[in-house]
Image: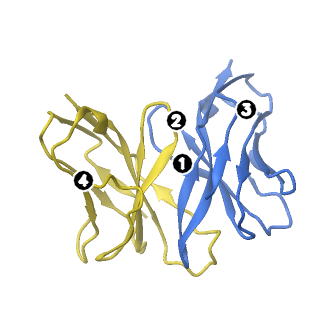
Amino acid sequence: AQKITQTQPGMFVQEKEAVTLDCTYDTSDQSYGLFWYKQPSSGEMIFLIYQGSYDEQNATEGRYSLNFQKARKSANLVISASQLGDSAMYFCAMGERIIQGAQKLVFGQGTRLTINP
Amino acid sequence: NAGVMQNPRHLVRRRGQEARLRCSPVKGHSHVYWYRQLPEEGLKFMVYLQKENIIDESGMPKERFSAEFPKEGPSILRIQQVVRGDSAAYFCASSPPGGLGLAKNIQYFGAGTRLSVL
């Protein structure tokens, strides 16, 4: 079974600084996907970025990038030039195959990020 | 395009009542997943459905919980005879039919239903 570990319960960062949120995973699968979601105080879950295990390059989406180190089984999220609106809970997740073309997501415990002005 | 729609956003029930949570997936998405989030925790998978079929319900409690995704209409998560421990946020997610390979089948979430049991 897949396992996701997020070791930072909370982080405080000054506005405009870059921040790295840690995520390590455990799996015996050769092919897998890693996801990051943001949950602001309003409660919805917002998809941020995806990394496939066979992707040759680290994923990037605007200010979000994924520092993927396969040998270390880590998939850290990097947010550049942080903004006040980045304050939220951040969840790392991994897909666990159900059937062809469908997977359940296994989530970490989350990291609460607070951006200070 | 409308995203995943869940209603109600907030639901209050007394112990012993029934809770019905609704989810309309993104148009064109045929896969629906339900997850539960207890306070200060990550989401936990409950059930995966396709139209008219439950494919994986390994995360569903054995009693009182059921889910359906009929041919027409939204997916429904039903909790009978609710207890205080059922208080949580329930999220629905949808994804398009598989075909991009296993990994990149992104699930898009609704805003959740927050169930409070008094």
Q: Are marks 2 and 4 on the same chain?
A: no
Same chain for mark 3 and mark 1? The answer is: yes
Disc 4 or disc 3, which is closer to the eye? 4
Q: Which mark is residue A82?
A: 3
Q: In the orientation shown, which residue stands out farthest toward the top?
A: A117
Q: Give whichever of discs 1 and 2 has the lower sequence position.
A: 2
**Among numbered discs 2 and 3, the one appearing first in the sequence:** 2
Q: Secondary structure at mark 1?
A: strand
Disc 4 marks which residue? B63
Question: Chain for mark 2?
Answer: A
The residue carrying pointer 4 sits among few (fewer than 14), some (14 to 19) or many (20 or more) residues within 10 Å by Cα, namely few
Q: Please identify which colour was used for chain B in the image.
A: yellow
Of residue B56 and residue A75, the one placed in the foreground of this image is B56
Task: Give the label on residue A40, or none.
Answer: 2
Is residue B2 visible to us here?
Answer: no
Q: State the CA–CA distance, disc 1 to disc 2.
A: 8 Å
Q: Which mark is residue A46?
A: 1
- Residue at position x 62%, y 74% from top? B102
As measured in the structure, the alpha-carbon distance from the residue carrying label 4 to the one carrying label 3 is: 45 Å
Report the quarter where the C terminus of chain A lies.
top right
Q: Say left or right for A39 vs A33.
A: left
In the rendering, at what x and y percent does residue A15 appear? 73, 24
Q: Earlier in the sequence, mark 3 or mark 1?
A: 1
Report how far apart the C-alphas of labels 4 and 1 lie in the structure.
31 Å
Q: Label 3 amino acid?
A: Ser
Locate residue B38, reporting x and y percent: 42, 36
Left or right of residue B46: residue A76 = right
